Amino acid sequence: KKKKWVAQKALSEAQRLHKSELQKRGWELGSTGDKLDYSQDQEYSRLDTALKARKALLDKAKKVGKPIVDEETGEEIPYLPIKTFTTEYVRTYSPPKSKD
């Protein structure tokens, strides 16, 4: 909550300043852009639901390790190859404080 308050104060201050003043401070205003509410479209919602159901079946075949048969439709659901393998990375974190 405190971070949100600080972000709002910084944005308010940045909006108050002229672009050249922002640049002197090393700041820049940006925007995430508008996003449409696709869920309001019935066809989009129908397709999205169908896509999620299909993905669940494909994920199930992956977990099993071989093609499976959809019990409702009798369709064979393929076992798909990996498109992108997991990437390992190192990140920083704050270790828990010692109880000593």
Image (cartoon, rainbow, N blue to C red):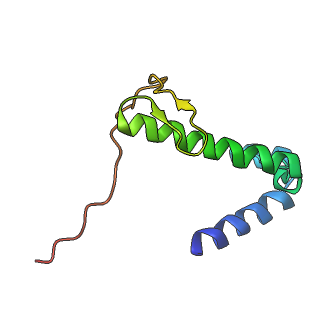
Q: Quadrant of the N terminus?
A: bottom right
What residue is drawn where x is 88% and y is 52%?
42
Pick the front one: 52 or 30? 52
Q: Is residue 99 above or below residue 68?
A: below
Pick the front one: 78 or 49? 78
Within the image, what quadrant is residue 50 found in? top right
What is the x, y in percent for residue 6? 64, 69
Pick the front one: 1 or 65? 65
Within the image, what quadrant is residue 7 found in? bottom right
What residue is drawn where x is 45% and y is 22%?
81
What is the x, y in percent for residue 13? 78, 63
What is the x, y in percent for residue 65? 35, 32
Q: Quadrant of the C terminus?
A: bottom left
What is the x, y in percent for residue 43? 86, 46
Pick the front one: 66 or 100? 66
| Direction from residue 50 to residue 18 in the image, left or right | right
What residue is drawn where x is 73% and y is 46%?
48
